[in-house]
Image (tube, helix red, strand yellow):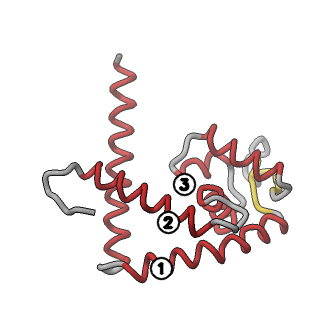
Amino acid sequence: MAHRPDVSLLFDLFVVSQRMRRVLADGMAGSGMRPDEYAVYGLLFMYGPMTATEMAEQLGLPLSTVLDYVNAIDEAGHLNRVRHPDDGRAVQLALNSRGVSAHNRANKHWEMVRKEIEGSLQMPKSQVRAALAALDDAAIAAALSAGRARARK
């Protein structure tokens, strides 16, 4: 990517996002999961059980999109639904043993890509994470601001 100060940071982010999507798609080929599916499985693997709302917050996705993923995971026979221990009306979601196996198969592909990307970084991973956190915070602030602007109309 050309490092030009006259180009928008958002454009740079778009370009990097497209490249990462392509690298992940190529790396995940043959894994049985697309990269976006793996991210959802990975969240449940690492942090489940959790509610769909909690998943949406963690993934930065609309709840309706998360529910589409949850339905696909359920249709694949990879999901357990359990009552929330603190709120009997809520349901928590977790991978069942078949879901964990599917995650583990795909993880081998994901890990190869992760190691390649992290091994090619030109700066410490902690600095990259800090920059990503700053971008995420800015995106959240912009979304909140846009929501307030829409509410005023």
Q: Return the residue at label 3.
A: 58
Q: CA distance from mark 3 to mark 2?
A: 23 Å
In primary-sequence order, the first of circles 1 and 2 is 2
Amino acid type indicated by mark 3: Gln
Q: CA distance from mark 1 to mark 2?
A: 10 Å
Q: Quadrant of the C terminus?
A: top left
What residue occupies the far bottom of the structure in this picture? Answer: 119
Q: Measuring 56% from the left and 65% from the top, which residue is drawn there? A: 26
Q: Return the residue at label 2.
A: 23
Which image quadrant for residue 49? bottom right
In primary-sequence order, the first of circles 3 and 1 is 3
The answer to the question of whether label 3 and label 2 lie on touching residues, with beta carbons closer than 8 A, is no
Q: Position of residue 87 (x, y in %)?
A: 74, 46
The answer to the question of whether label 1 and label 2 lie on touching residues, with beta carbons closer than 8 A, is yes
State left or right for residue 151 relative to residue 44. Answer: left
Q: Return the residue at label 1.
A: 116
Amino acid type indicated by mark 2: Val
User: Does dot 3 land on a helix, a strand or a loop?
Assistant: helix
Q: Measuring 33% from the left and 26% from the top, which residue is drawn there? A: 149
What crowding class fits label 3: few (fewer than 14 Cα within 10 Å), some (14-19), or many (20 or more)? few
The numbered disc on residue 32 is: none
